[in-house]
Amino acid sequence: MTEIQEHLLGLLKEIDGICRKYDIPYYLAGGSFVGAVRHGGFLPWDDDADIHMYRDDAERFAEAVKKEGLKNRVVFKQSPKGQYSQVHWRYENTATTSLLRSLVATDALQGQFVDIFILYPVPRDEKEKQEYVDNYELYLELRARNVSVASRNRDREYLKRYYKAKKREKIFGFRKVQEELEKKIFCYPDEDADEWLIRSLHPTHRTTPKAWWGTPRYVDFEDTQFPVAEHAEQLLCTQYGPTWFEIPAHVERGQHTIVEDFEIPYTVYTAEYGKHIDEKKFYRQCVKKKEFWFRLLWDRNVIRPQIWDMRALQLSMEIQHLVEQYHLDLKAMVEQGRFDELEAIFAPCFVFYGQEPVRFWGTYVDLPDAYLYAAVYNSCFNGNYGQAKKVLGKRKKLERPLSADLEELDAVCNATDRLLTSIYTDKDFAAAREITEEWLARYPRLVYFMRAKMALDIRDEAQDDQTLLAQCERFLESYPNDGELMKYRGDLLMKMEQKQEAEHCYERAMNKTQNGFCIREIREYFADHQRKEKR
């Protein structure tokens, strides 16, 4: 654990102690939730902690914290002047410092904190639900007076409502307008809902089924246990997709810009930088900047998508010109396995998809189906099917049918989804075996299915270890650097008492797999081995 995580763990233990004492249910949330299920503790890069509570329980928790009288501990809901831009609450240690960039020069408390994301009931009726969520989206933006909340993709209907609300703010004041929205959003009865709304700026999904939360289920977390949702795996699959068990690439790992100090309270820092800037003026300027930004959005949100569509068209023409200029037969290149060359041809396309504005606007590089097939074919097989799935998803939104080749690749992606959901979310190993056998017979190079076959065969005690080892080595001939297959090879060697070679496989696998469960098992093995040696 990092120093930040050690202090966060202390705060989480305090919360857990209070909740146990007063019989208040709660669940780990966000990165803490993923870390608990996948890693047995913090995500290695995590720098904050999060929990979920139901609205009535959150109020009970706030009262319990007051009653306990813990020194320098508060449940922070809203700053006195309304400058706290977040919509969630915090359990905070005011004797420390955790300065967030978005809260500079505001009157928010800024000690180290655990975020409390409150769950609110959502209407069943689809029309009412949409109005409810629309009101919540508007509330988010109005609450964050000094910063913009993902406003680049707001349509004009939303902007009309926003401008109207801002006019009302000038007449009645921002608190009055916020309170009106809060009465519409946060006062819906629990018994009339099948879903919860998550009170957060940027949840992966705004609402989730109530049935998945259920009775809190305690799981290992570092040196203790904390609760997660009863159907945690289903919730994770909904929030992050069937590959939720995989560790994301470095560029996708979310971190905050924070100044941390566990010895000096934040008031020392705010007083010091307050000497050098006019905080009131700075805050007012931030509010004006946001107001100006929103005035631009009326036209900008029409023009910007068109600009990126033009860039996508230019890229499509450049790629087609390249292929025609050199008389390339893309289908033959796929059949011959010339994937490095194909990757070089289509690399600019995937770099384009990686740009933030492209993700915001959902821009699509419209290539002919034969080109798209060559571009995503290998991704479907080599463990990067998520990339192919996203691009095919964009292509399916166009008003023209897929080619037969693309239909088949789409079927491969869907089968991979079903396979991973069966294993890691539903734990339905019989269904996973059926899917594995069917698709490996059709496509022997599907690496996710190779991994699944190894995992399922190793679980089967009737299987012969030597036969499985030979099978694993055949798979590794196709993907010699696949960390998960290396890990399974190590498991088999360990069973065959070839400890040194098994450990060598584990060491190599650690740096070559994204499977969080495999990494966790390897780390636990070496940690246990070290403990035994010390004895």
Image: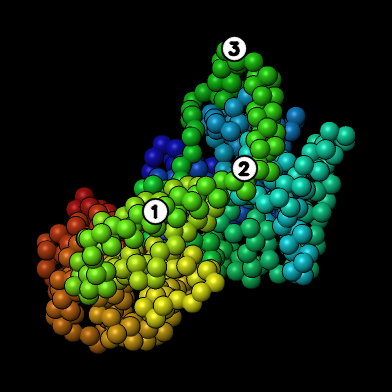
Image coordinates for residue 315, horizontal then vertical, percent: 39, 53
Image coordinates for residue 251, horizontal then vertical, percent: 39, 47
Q: Would you identify the image quadrant in which residue 332 lies?
A: bottom left
Q: Find the residue positioned furthest to the right.
A: 171
* On-image quarter of the N terminus: top left
Instruction: Give neighbour class at mark 2: few <14, some 14-19, many 20+ (Cα, 10 Å).
Output: some
On residue 275, the disc is 3
Say which amino acid is labelled 1. Leu
Please give the residue where the numbered disc 2 appears in the rendered image: 300
Contact (Cβ within 8 Å) of mark 2 with mark 3: no
Q: CA distance from mark 2 to mark 3?
A: 38 Å
Image coordinates for residue 423, horizontal then vertical, percent: 40, 75
Image coordinates for residue 286, horizontal then vertical, percent: 65, 28
Q: Is residue 202 left or right of residue 240?
A: right
Q: Is residue 511 visible?
A: yes
On residue 209, the disc is none
Helix, strand or loop at disc 3?
loop
Q: CA distance from mark 3 to mark 1?
A: 51 Å
Q: Nearer the viewer, mark 1 or mark 2?
A: 1
